[in-house]
Amino acid sequence: MTHGVLLPGVTDVVDPDFARELESLGYGRVWTGELWGTDAFLSLSHVAHHTDDIDLGTAIVNVFSRSPATLAAAAATLNATTGRDVVLGVGASTPKAVEDLHGVDYDRPVRRIHETVELVKAYTSKSDERVDYDGELFDVADFPPLDADIPVYVAALGPASRRATGRVADGWLPHNVPFPRLAEAFEVVADAAREAGRDPDDIAVAPYVPSAVSDDADEARRAVKGHLAYYVGSGEGYRKAVAQSFPDAAEAVAEAWRAGDREDARAAVTDEMVDALGVAGTPEDAREQFRAVAALDAVDDPIVVVPAQADEAMTMRTVRELSPERA
């Protein structure tokens, strides 16, 4: 099994030795997110400079802080300068990140995802036709495509954004969708794809798999609980996704988080939530859990995501024990 890994610490410069180790462990792709402090495309270029052939992906960059043309140019440039396969993972992010950091309105996020993906694909196509697009949010005219091959994946939670994914995207990046519900959730993507005349089998599913490995299983589970508490507590879309399976627990986590009680929020994350939303335990148990997620019919390319709550030792243990050469 060859799978990917999300680089931890999106505000930190990637350690070249760490990047080289990920490649030596057999990971097929490194993904990086972006919030504030580092640039996703420059970080991936840095990774490529210090590795031989590991592929690259953004998971995710938001669709508000760059125009579709800028996203297309960045991904195409990364592809051309590194010679690596590049996946552009995009999403709407959150009002907090978009409005308070970038100073732009968090307006019509689903429509913005739809038009951004369509335009990026047009701009990076190998077509001889110049790009003209008349959308509700973007109106562009008469520019040549970049002759690149850039699959575009979407981090989509709600049904509206999943429908947009099915209509226009090459892949889906689910996060905090309980693994037992992935197939059901993907059917929304698949139905939209069929309505658009597309084959759902052509849409890759690359779920985030929050993962922590330790000889102390409780310590590993505590790290994943902290990860889940942060997302369920601070993001309404994540709370709603988790509430599909755990309505009472998700509300308890969110209520504690809103009250500023971070430890209470972590404590409200149940063991059942950890089992359905992550991988945590001793090396052997965690590998067995990860294999079970990877074997789901709805999953194509699982992504190991080490919680920010893990220390350096747990981070290294996790990426080593769940690497393709061991998983």
Image: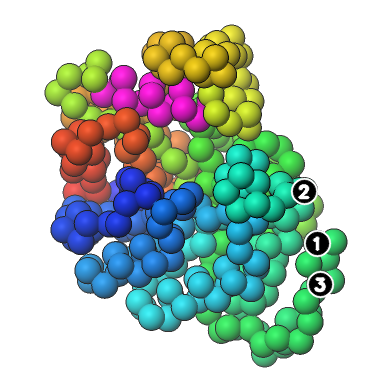
Image location (x, y in percent) of residue 173 = 52, 46
Instruction: Tell me the tag on residue 58.
Output: none
Q: What type is the residue that disc 3 sits on?
A: Asp
Q: Amino acid at mark 1?
A: Leu
Return the disc, 2 or 1, that comes first in the chain's sequence. 2
Give the magenta part as a residue range. Answer: 220-232
Count numbered badges in the picture: 3
Who's the residue at 34% across and 42% down the image? Answer: 304
Q: How far apart in space, not on screen, are marks 3 and 1 (Cα)?
A: 7 Å
Query: Is 214 situated above or below 252?
Result: below
Element type where label 3 sits in the image: strand
Query: Badge 2 is on which residue?
Result: 108
Left or right side of 117 for 209? left
Determine the image quadrant of residue 95. top right
Task: Looking at this view, name the residue that lies furthest to the bottom.
Answer: 128
- Is residue 91 within the magenta segment? no
Residue 140 horizontal/vertical position (percent): 78, 76
Residue occupying the point 57% across, 35% down: 183
Residue ID for mark 3? 139
Q: Amino acid at mark 2?
A: Arg
Q: Are marks 3 and 2 in contact (CB under 8 Å)?
A: no
**Badge 2: how crowded within 10 Å, few (<14), some, or many (20+)?**
few
Residue 270 shows in this picture: no
Which residue lies under the disc numbered 1? 137
